[in-house]
Image (tube, helix red, strand yellow):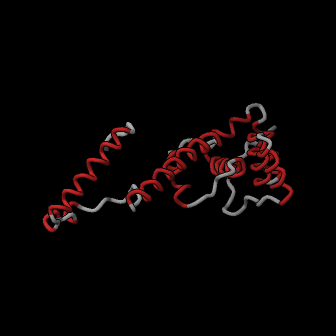
């Protein structure tokens, strides 16, 4: 008779991977065998005995384990780790992780989803850097308030120069097909 196993591990009972285990999972991920890397990562974190209990309990339907909420943090940890291994240009920051978590919006994550979110994050970072370079501010920062612009204190020649530069900029945007936003 098989016993039904629930993952009710107290905080800190998941094991750290040994250097050999980590290297084996890295090798699997680098070869593109993402499912095997995730499975082995989870097995090593759980420990041999717990992993075997889970295997024998759910061998008729291994995906049944994925439906159990108590295993979700472990699988998500494995997916994030694997994503970090296969995404060579990924450097985690607090802002990037928050962006990816917002993108996944509580859905069951996988490496492909995180890679798509990362591509979008890089695009936003690039546009933000461009805005900062062009306008001297980040895209999410509010521009100066209208009260800060005082046209009354400008001379007629300064106003004409500002008008001319603004019109040229608008024409340039129109020529490039971007229009005024």
Q: Nearer the viewer, residue 40 or 168?
A: 168
Quadrant of the rendering where the N terminus is positioned? top right
Residue lying furthest top: 60
Residue ID at (61%, 43%): 115
Residue ID at (67%, 53%): 8
Q: Is residue 129 above or below residue 176?
A: below
Residue ID at (51%, 51%): 126
Residue 179 falls in which quadrant of the image? top left
Residue 54 falls in which quadrant of the image? top right
Q: Nearer the viewer, residue 152 or 114?
A: 152
Q: Position of residue 94 (x, y in %)?
A: 54, 61
Q: Is residue 131 above or below residue 153?
A: above
Quadrant of the rendering where the C terminus is positioned? top left
Residue lying furthest front: 157
Q: Position of residue 176 (x, y in %)?
A: 39, 39
Q: Position of residue 89 (x, y in %)?
A: 65, 52
Residue lying furthest right: 20
Q: Nearer the viewer, residue 153 or 13?
A: 153
């Amino acid at each position: 008779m098989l016993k039904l196993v629930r993952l009710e591990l107290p905080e800190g009972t998941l094991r750290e991977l040994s250097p050999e285990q980590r290297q084996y999972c890295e090798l699997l991920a680098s070869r593109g065998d993402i499912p095997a890397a995730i499975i082995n990562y989870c097995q090593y974190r759980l420990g041999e005995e717990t992993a075997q209990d889970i295997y024998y309990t759910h061998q008729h339907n291994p995906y049944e384990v994925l439906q159990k909420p108590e295993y979700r943090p472990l699988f998500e940890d494995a997916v994030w780790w694997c994503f970090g291994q296969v995404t060579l240009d990924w450097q985690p920051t607090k802002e990037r992780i928050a962006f990816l978590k917002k993108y996944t919006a509580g859905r069951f994550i996988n490496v492909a989803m995180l890679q798509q979110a990362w591509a979008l994050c890089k695009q936003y970072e690039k546009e933000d850097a461009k805005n900062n370079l062009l306008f001297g501010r980040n895209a999410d920062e509010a521009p100066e308030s209208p009260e800060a612009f005082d046209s009354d204190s400008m001379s007629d020649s300064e106003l004409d120069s500002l008008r001319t530069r603004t019109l040229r900029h608008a024409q340039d945007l129109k020529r490039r097909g971007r229009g005024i936003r």
